[in-house]
Image (cartoon, helix red, strand yellow):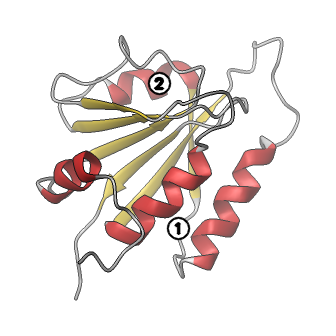
Amino acid sequence: MLRHKLIHPQINEIIGRAGHHALILIADGHYPSSTKKGPNAELVSLNLMPGLVTCAQVLEAILSAAPIDAVHTMMYEEADPYALKQDPPVWDEYRALLKKCGMELKLDPIKKWDFYTKVETPDHILTVQTGDMQRFANLLLSIGVRMD
């Protein structure tokens, strides 16, 4: 029996064979997951309907199952007409989850087009597409080293 919260068999299998520095994208419902992915990435679609499931729910499950050493968020470009004057509200939810899981990781924003470029590398192994409709909810996780 699994001892963590993540029970999705395909996601567990992909994470189980991943190595250090492999990248997991948790994509919001707006992300173009079929065209913006790395050559080794597998896509798991969990976007049942708008709002189900959310990026935060997927983050919580993955944090329970894999050692994560970096959390990158997608930052808007300053020229974006929808640019926010502060962090997107969903980022506070991510910070609370990291704290709840006992992790001292900080969110590391990457500008939108640089984020896409980082995702398109061979290290990208998994995209979990969600139904999260919040703006700038995308997360790119880097797998770390298991210490126990």
Looking at the image, residue 6 sits to the left or right of residue 71; the answer is left
123 or 56, which lies in front? 56
**Mark 1 or mark 2, which has the lower sequence index?**
1
User: Helix, strand or loop at disc 1?
Assistant: loop
Residue furthest to the right = 85
Dot 1 and dot 2 residues touching (CB under 8 Å): no
Does residue 67 sit above or below 15 in this rendering? below
Q: Position of residue 75 (x, y in %)?
A: 64, 32
Name the quarter where the C terminus is drawn: bottom left
Q: Residues within 10 Å of mark 2 (few under 14, many from 20)?
A: few
Residue 33 appears in view: yes
Q: Looking at the rendering, which quadrant does residue 63 occupy?
A: bottom left
Residue in the image at 34% along x and 68% along y: 65
Does residue 25 sit above or below 49 in this rendering? below
Does residue 128 sit above or below 99 in this rendering? above
- Disc 2 marks which amino acid? Asp
Does residue 43 sit above or below 60 in this rendering? above
**Residue assigned mark 2:** 114
Q: Position of residue 23 (x, y in %)?
A: 30, 44
Number of the label disc, if any, that sits on residue 105: 1
Residue in the image at 42% along x and 69% along y: 5
